[in-house]
Image: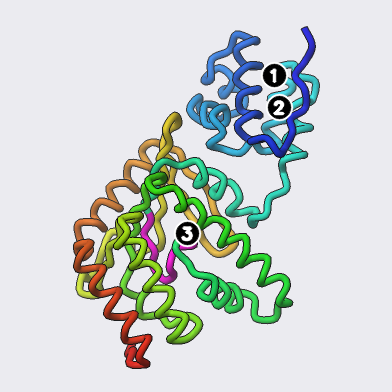
Amino acid sequence: MPGPKDLDPSSSPRALLGAELRHARERKGLSQAELGEPLFVSGSFIGQLETGTRRLQLELAVQIDEILDTGGFFERNCRALAKSKYPDHFAEAAEAEAVATSIRQYAQLLIPGLLQTRAYAEAVFRAYQPTAPDAVIETLVVTRLERTHLLDDPTTPLLWAVLDEAVLRREVGGGAVMAEALYHVADLARRHRIIMQVLSFGAGAHAAMHGTLKLMEFEDAPPLSFAEAPDMGKLLDDPATVARHHLMFSLLQAAALSPPDSLALIESVAQDYEHGEHHP
């Protein structure tokens, strides 16, 4: 029987690679758990690779080729698909985000990337890289705006965002930029495309004071949590950890203003920015 053909990266490559992994594993008569054991990963992790939820890393690809006798197929295709337009620490999370059925996110300081406007994103990237050439900043902005097209679908993914009040009060790019950015978030909420709440300063201590929180759920794979720090990020699939993060998000929802009150606050702050009356 001929071996599998190398994949075309233009044709949903991660999903195709996952399908080939499932085919090769089943041909060897191994369960997901049995394949995961020598790789020191869980059976659910193998399942996430097979559904395309997780990205296959080169080190694992080499070992999988050895275990499944696939003649370097997974290593070759993993190398071909390794390039990403996203930073290394965020690439896998961005790919998971693209196939998620629901995203729940707590933002501590910035409007989430999926909700940003061009001017807001440009101001953020310029603050990160004050000496970068304009072309570099433009590439970063375009890549971020491409992610926002996930919301072009009227229903999927479900996006529930809890914004700390600091997100509204921190002036990014000036008053006009902030007014536009907050009106954009408010518009998405008014069109029922997102569920949005604000965690006001009056809420006091809360469950996520350590930082941001992002949870993703999928149609045919276990949920994931994404932990991020400057130039670092990791997808977490440990069931106990993900369950704890879900509880944290539920506590944030309970402590935050209701969606109508949150919308009223965001539009009020946007109007203040618009009229030059904002006072942090």
User: For residue 63, which numbered disc appears in the image?
Assistant: 2
| Amino acid at pointer 3 | Leu
**Residue 43 among magenta residues:** no
Quarter of the image where the C terminus is located: bottom left
The magenta region covers: 105-113
Answer above or below: position of 235 versus 117.
above
Dot 1 falls on a residue whose secondary structure is helix
Marked residue nearer the N-terminal end (3 or 2): 2
| Amino acid at pointer 2 | Gln
Distance between mark 1 and mark 2 Cα atoms:
6 Å
User: Which of pointers 1 and 3 indicates the residue nearer the eye?
Assistant: 3
User: For residue 114, which numbered disc appears in the image?
Assistant: 3
Dot 3 falls on a residue whose secondary structure is helix
| Mark 3 vs 2: CB contact within 8 A | no
User: For residue 229, which numbered disc appears in the image?
Assistant: none
Answer above or below: position of 169 versus 240.
below
Residue nearest the viewer, comparing 241 with 7: 7
Q: Which colour scheme is used?
A: rainbow
Dot 2 falls on a residue whose secondary structure is helix
Answer above or below: position of 196 versus 18.
below
| Mark 1 vs 2: CB contact within 8 A | yes
User: Which of pointers 3 and 2 indicates the residue nearer the eye?
Assistant: 3
Which residue lies at the image location 44% right of the left edge and 70% below the top edge? 110
Determine whether, in the image, residue 26 is placed left or right of residue 61: left
Q: Mark 1 points at which residue?
A: 67
Q: Quadrant of residue 70?
A: top right
